[in-house]
Amino acid sequence: MDARFLTLADVAETLNISAAQAYALVRTGDLPAIKVGGRGQWRVESTALERYIERMYQQTRDFVATHPFGGDAQIEDEEIL
C-alpha cells in the first residue's frame, strides 16, 4: 500500500529538487501540506503532489503555446530564406 503522506524529502526526491526547494513550494502555498507532530514536521498528501505535478504540466503546456520557439517559427524563418 502506498503511503498517504510524504515527507518533504520524499517530495524533493520525486521532483528531483532540493529539500529547500520542496520546503519553498510548501511555504509559498504552491504545494498544499500540513504540519504534524510536536516538532511540526511537514507532510504532503500524495494526491496533492500528483495534482501539483498535473498543474505544472498544464502551466507548461500553456506557456509553450503562448511562447512558441522553434516548430512553426523555425519553418517561417526557413521559408523567408
Image (spheres, helix red, strand yellow):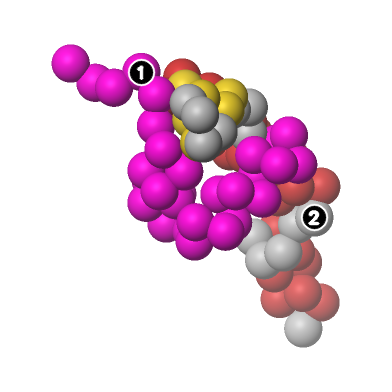
Residue 60: percent from left, percent from top:
66, 45
Q: Nearer the viewer, residue 20 or 59?
A: 20
Q: Is residue 63 left or right of residue 15?
A: right
- Check disc 2: other Cα within 10 Å, few if <14, some if 14-19, many if 20+: few
Contact between marks 1 and 2 (CB within 8 A): the answer is no
Q: Nearer the viewer, residue 55 or 24?
A: 24
Q: Alpha-carbon distance for marks 1 and 2?
A: 37 Å
Residue at 70% across, 58% down: 72
Identify the image quadrant of the C terminus.
Answer: bottom right
Residue 18 visible within the image: yes
Rendering quarter of residue 34: top right
Residue 74: percent from left, percent from top:
69, 69
Residue holding disc 1? 4
Asked if the magenta segment contains residue 13, the reply would be yes
Q: Is residue 44 left or right of residue 71?
A: left
- Check disc 1: other Cα within 10 Å, few if <14, some if 14-19, many if 20+: few
Q: Nearer the viewer, residue 59 or 37?
A: 37
Which segment did they paint magenta?
A: 1-30
Residue type at numbered disc 2: His
Residue at 70% across, 36% down: 30
Residue 67 numbered tag:
2
Rendering quarter of residue 31: top right
Residue at 66% across, 50% down: 24
Element on which disc 1 rests: loop
Q: Is residue 75 left or right of residue 17?
A: right
Identify the image quadrant of the N terminus.
Answer: top left
